């Protein structure tokens, strides 16, 4: 695993790189970071040069979080223009829309785009617990209590139901966050498998 940084517009973006071949950029969702992809990086690196970076304001990258997707799309462009990126496939997680490549200022470098958990899914399939959890986090933020807001969101997110409709017990932010990272990585891989990811001759290939 190689780690490095790339300069965005007023921010330094940290990334992890593994594998060789055609570049494949992984963009995590809002509120997460590059390690969220978990073993997905290792599996895809058998067939691609995988680049998973922390969006600005998350993980190891600098700058405060921003909501303007055009800024994040511009950062994606900076990653796409890294040496050796040429024609690149970009895989997006929650919070990424198909507009990102066209707004990245480097659309010619994007060969294909796979959108995982597009933003509209959250509102389209919103539940009462989801809306109440997000509302509690937002109220705390507006009151100038970001840590309280983060805790409210973490309690909702890490309280998702597991297999067999079993509610996951809350064991604290760190332990449930570790579980959530593993669970998210598994869901990402399962979605990629449904989208045509297959194993051929010992390597993973998007059919």
Image (cartoon, grey):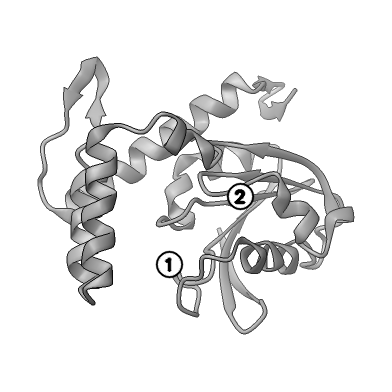
Residue found at x 58% / y 80%? 11
Instruction: Answer with the quarter of the image where residue 75 lies.
Output: bottom right
Residue that numbered label 2 is attached to: 26
Mark 1, residue position:
59
Q: Position of residue 169 (x, y in %)?
A: 11, 36
Residue appearing at x 53%, y 70% in the figure: 56
For residue 139, above or below residue 46:
below
Residue 135 on image: x %, y %: 26, 52
| 178 on left or right of 191 | left
Q: How many marks?
A: 2
Residue 163 seen in render: yes
Q: Residues within 10 Å of mark 1 (few under 14, many from 20)?
A: some
Q: Element type at marker 1?
A: loop
Q: Quadrant of the C terminus?
A: top right
Which numbered disc flags the more N-terminal residue, 2 or 1? Answer: 2
Residue 10, compared with residue 207, is above or below; it is below
In the image: residue 28, left or right of residue 168 = right
Residue 33: percent from left, percent from top: 45, 58
- The image quarter containing residue 185 is top left
Farthest top residue in view: 164
């Amino acid at each position: 695993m190689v780690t490095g940084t790339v300069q965005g517009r007023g921010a330094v973006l940290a990334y992890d790189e593994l594998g060789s071949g055609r570049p494949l950029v992984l963009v995590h969702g809002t509120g997460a970071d590059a390690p969220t992809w978990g073993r997905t990086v290792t599996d895809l690196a058998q067939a691609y040069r995988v680049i998973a970076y922390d969006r600005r304001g998350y993980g190891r990258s600098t700058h405060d979080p921003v909501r303007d997707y055009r800024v994040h799309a511009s950062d994606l462009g900076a990653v796409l223009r890294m040496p050796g990126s040429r024609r690149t496939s970009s895989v997006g997680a929650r919070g990424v829309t198909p507009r990102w490549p066209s707004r990245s200022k480097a659309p010619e470098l994007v060969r294909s785009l796979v959108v995982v958990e597009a933003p509209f899914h959250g509102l389209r399939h919103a539940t009462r617990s989801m809306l109440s959890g997000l509302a509690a986090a937002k109220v705390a933020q507006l009151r100038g209590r970001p840590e309280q807001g983060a805790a409210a969101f973490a309690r909702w997110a890490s309280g998702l139901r597991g297999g067999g409709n079993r509610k996951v017990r809350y064991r604290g932010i760190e332990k449930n966050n570790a579980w959530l990272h593993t669970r998210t990585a598994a869901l990402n891989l399962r979605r990629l498998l449904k989208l045509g990811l297959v194993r051929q001759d010992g390597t993973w290939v998007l059919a």
